[in-house]
Every structure is written in C-alpha cells, then in structure tokens.
Amino acid sequence: MATINQNFLNLKESYLFSDIAKRVSAYQEAHPEAEIIRLGIGDVTRPLAPAIAEEMARASLEMAKAETFKGYGPEQGYGFLKRAILEHDFAARGVSLSEDEIFVSDGAKSDCGNFGDILGADNVVAITEPAYPVYIDTNLMAGRQVKFIECRAENGFLPEVPDFKADILYLCSPNNPTGAVLSKEQLRAFVDYANANGTLLIFDSAYEQFISDGALPHSIYEVEGAKRCAVEIRSFSKTAGFTGIRCGYTVVPHELTARDAAGNEVPLNRLWNRRQTTRFNGASYISQRGAAAYYTPEGRAQCRENVAYYMENAKLIARTVRGLGIPAIGGDNAPYIWMQCPDGLDSWSFFDLLLERAQVVGTPGVGFGAAGEGWFRLTAFGTQEHTARAMERFTNLFGK
C-alpha cells in the first residue's frame, strides 16, 4: 500500500474559502429568498478590458490557422510579454532586470507555493501574520518549521523585522488580508536583515497597482541590495481581471543564491529554471497575449479604470465602517479593508452575524492566522451597486 506525505496531516481539514463556501451554501439553501452580497473572496466582477479581450480573440484565431498555430511555448514565458514586463513594471521605476530573470506562470498563487520546490525542508520559515493561507500551508506540506511575525493593531498591522534568524521570510505589500503597505524605509529594514542573515525574501506584490501614494514602492527591487536576497511574485488577476484566465510572473535575479549541503552558493535562477522546465509547460499563448495587451496604452488606460472602480468601493467601505466607529485599516492603497469585529465578537461569530442579519459575506480574520482573531476582511471587488447596498445594511445593523 502506498504511504502518504505525513506533512499533509498537519494542515487544517479544509481550506479557509472552502469553509466559507459551505456556510454560505447552507444559509442560501435555508433562505432561498435572501439576496447575499459577497465581499469575501477576492474575485473580480468587472469584465476584461476591451483591448485585452480583443487581443486574446486575435490570438485564439491564430491558433486556428496552421501558419500561426502555437504548440508548447517556452516554459519561462514568451519574449514579447517579458519585454513588456521589463519596460513597464521595472525600467519605468528605475529597476534594471534582464529577460531571463522573468518567469511567466499561471498565477501568483501557484508560484507562492511552488517556489518551495527548490528549497530544503530544513529551512526555518518566517511568515508575517495575518497571512495569505498559501504561504503557511505549502510550507507545512513540505515539512518546514514555520515561525510567525505577528502584526497587531498597535502598529497598523505592519510587520517588524524578526528578532530571530529565519532562512526564508514571506512579505506581502500591499498586504492581503490587512491592506497595510510597507514604505521604502520599512522594506529597506527587511532587505538589510535578509542580507545580514542570509535570508531569502519571498515578496508578494500582487496588488501593487492599487497603490495611489507616489511615495510608496511598487517593487522590492526599488531598495538597494534586494536583488541579492529577494524573489518577487506578481499577478495579473486583479489588475487585469485574470482571475479565471490565470497569468502571473516571478522575478528571480541572477545575484540571488542559496547554499547546498556542502555550503556552496548556488544560483536560484538556475534551479528555478530547471524546476519550471521539468514541471511546468508554460502559461498559454492566448493568456500571455492578453497579458501583453495589458501593457499597451489602451490596455493600461482601461485597466486603470477598473482599478479606480474597485478603489471607489474600497473608499466607500472604509468610510462607512470608520463612520460607524469601527476601527479599520486599508482601503486607500489596497483593495482590502481590515476591520475590527464590533462588540468584542470573535471572527467566525461576526461572520455568522453578518450573514444572518445583513446577508453580507466577508472573511473571518482568524482564517489568516491567530493574529487575525477578532478582525474581519472585506474586499472591494464587488459591483458598486452591491457594495453600496452592503454598506446600507452595515449602517442599518451597526448604526447607533
């Protein structure tokens, strides 16, 4: 009989969003007349930008002709997309990278988990908490020791450099779930810590396009020395509406190394390339053509309209919650609002109350780790009509 990976038994029985879906489904079955407004999972509601949809349609037609048909593409991504990424996401912000440091993927979630394939199970991993569950679960699956850097309300849920040595450290800015954003000075402290301790930073910047404050960094590579210690992971899911299309990318600089069992430094770019060519056949040509269209003048303008649409929702949610006297952060440079559960309720009790009395769905903060207990995440990815109606229900429920 085959044996299992025993580490999977260290995981919670089910994924956070599966638990939420079950509770909502049970409520809907018992109350079929209820209009449930979902401000929980971060799935987009706006359609694809026309420039992207048109380019993907053209790419689909190419696949129907022998002379333009594409089979397997390069596992690292097509050059036309990588060049657009380099120009618009990095060179425009003063960051110099090369094409072979960009690895196009089927989304940030995959790479956040898969990057651990090239890292040893004996690494000590530091994760800022509250945290996106994938960071924690995939490291537990690999059998790594996980330590937490607790982020609390007193410091605006911003992480502080740990007082212990970590081999790997996850950062997310703008943060999911809290909406907190690290300044350049705060990022520099982590880069300095990483270079002093030989720590690999895994920097998730999936929401960088939601930053409106010009003083805030969009890439960790805006900090000197980051190429020696950091991987950066990005996504087209929210900024270009690719939640169901799947495309993202990871940057692995040539300077970035880790040690083998003999103590020799090994370039991680080389190992990640080896992993990708073995276990990944590349994102589809059609999705990459769509991602490249995001970088055209039309595509960027249309996607900025979508981001602005969601940020109007974020501002409304933040304004409503704070206006009710409920402490909250986020909503200004991130599409998430992290609110304290009123009346001392725990996260799941507040989830149930909000569902039963307002028919609004959010995400219990404790689902992002123990440091999230007593807090709650709302997302800006609903329609403006649904968001406004949800906030009316909030006001009716919690207004004095």
Image (cartoon, rainbow, N blue to C red):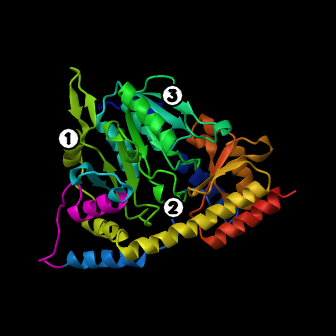
Position in image of residue 70 (x %, y %):
17, 68
Residue assigned mark 2: 43
Amino acid under disc 3: Pro
Precedes in sequence: disc 2 or disc 3: 2
**Residue positioned 19% across, 48% down in the render:** 277
Residue assigned mark 1: 270
Position in image of residue 37 (x %, y %):
65, 64
Q: Please report contact status of discs 3 and 1: CB closer than 8 Å, yes or no.
A: no
Going by the image, does 222 lie left or right of 149?
left
Going by the image, does 117 lie left or right of 166?
left
SS of the residue at dot 2? loop
Precedes in sequence: disc 3 or disc 1: 3
Amino acid under disc 2: Asp
**Residue positioned 84% across, 58% down in the render:** 399
Q: CA distance from mark 2 to mark 1?
A: 34 Å
Q: Nearer the viewer, mark 2 or mark 3?
A: 3
**Magenta stretch contains residue 270:** no
SS of the residue at dot 3? loop
Position in image of residue 202 (x %, y %):
39, 40
In-front residue for pair 209/57: 209
In-front residue for pair 94/252: 94
Does residue 62 appear in this view? yes
Dividing the picture into quadrants, the one containing residue 236 is bottom left
> Quadrant where the C terminus lies?
bottom right
In-front residue for pair 322/22: 322
Dividing the picture into quadrants, the one containing residue 198 is top left
Where does the magenta region start and end?
65-89
Residue assigned mark 3: 162
In this picture, is 190 found above or below 91? above
Q: CA distance from mark 3 to mark 1?
A: 29 Å
> Quadrant where the N terminus lies?
top left
